[in-house]
Image: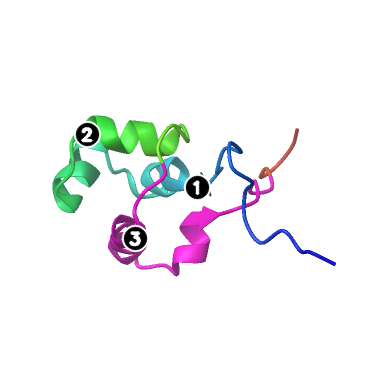
Amino acid sequence: MIRKTGPAPGDKENVHNRIAVLRAERGISRRDLAAALGVHYQTVGYLERGEYSPSLYLALRIAEYFEVPVEVVFSLKPFPRIGGT
């Protein structure tokens, strides 16, 4: 039996995140987060929309910035919706 351990060639790697939620909870703009991380503010937008998956280094820096474990920010599965449909 062969187990699939990752995406097959050609499959899109989806990394879901809560960056927008964490920013909103803390009142942080995309520009402020980008400046703190040393990236362009558009990069934050790409990350939030799932158009770009961060490097491990950037993912860890984002988690560190928000002072939460990386699993709170990123997941391979969609996060459950909060409060409703």
Q: Earlier in the sequence, mark 3 or mark 1?
A: 1
Residue at which label 2 appears: 41
Q: Residue at x 42, y 46 (%)?
A: 19
Q: Earlier in the sequence, mark 2 or mark 3?
A: 2
The image's colour scheme reads rainbow
How many numbered circles does the render carry? 3
Residue type at tag 1:
Asn
Q: Residue at x 39, y 39 (%)?
A: 47
Q: Are marks 2 and 3 in contact (CB under 8 Å)?
A: no
Residue at which label 3 appears: 66
Residue 55 occupies which quadrant of the picture? Answer: bottom left
Q: Is 2 drawn above or below residue 41 in the view shown?
A: below
Between disc 2 and disc 3, the foreground one is 2
Distance in Å between CA atoms under marks 3 and 1: 13 Å
Would residue 68 be counted in the magenta stretch?
yes
Q: Secondary structure at mark 2?
A: helix
Looking at the picture, how far across and down is residue 23, in whole percent? Answer: 37, 45
Q: Residue at x 34, y 60 (%)?
A: 66
Looking at the picture, how far across and down is residue 59, in whole percent? Answer: 36, 57
Quarter of the figure that contains the N terminus: bottom right
Q: Secondary structure at mark 1?
A: strand
Apparent side of residue 81 relative to residue 74 in the rendered image (left or right):
right
Distance in Å between CA atoms under marks 2 and 1: 16 Å
Q: Which mark is residue 30?
A: none
Between disc 3 and disc 1, the foreground one is 1
Q: Residue at x 47, y 56 (%)?
A: 73
Looking at the picture, how far across and down is residue 26, in whole percent? Answer: 35, 50
Residue at which label 1 appears: 17
Tell me if mark 2 has few (under 14), some (14-19) or many (20+) residues whose alpha carbon lies within 10 angstroms of its own.
Answer: some
Which segment is the magenta one?
Answer: 53-80
Q: Secondary structure at mark 3?
A: helix
Residue type at tag 2:
Tyr
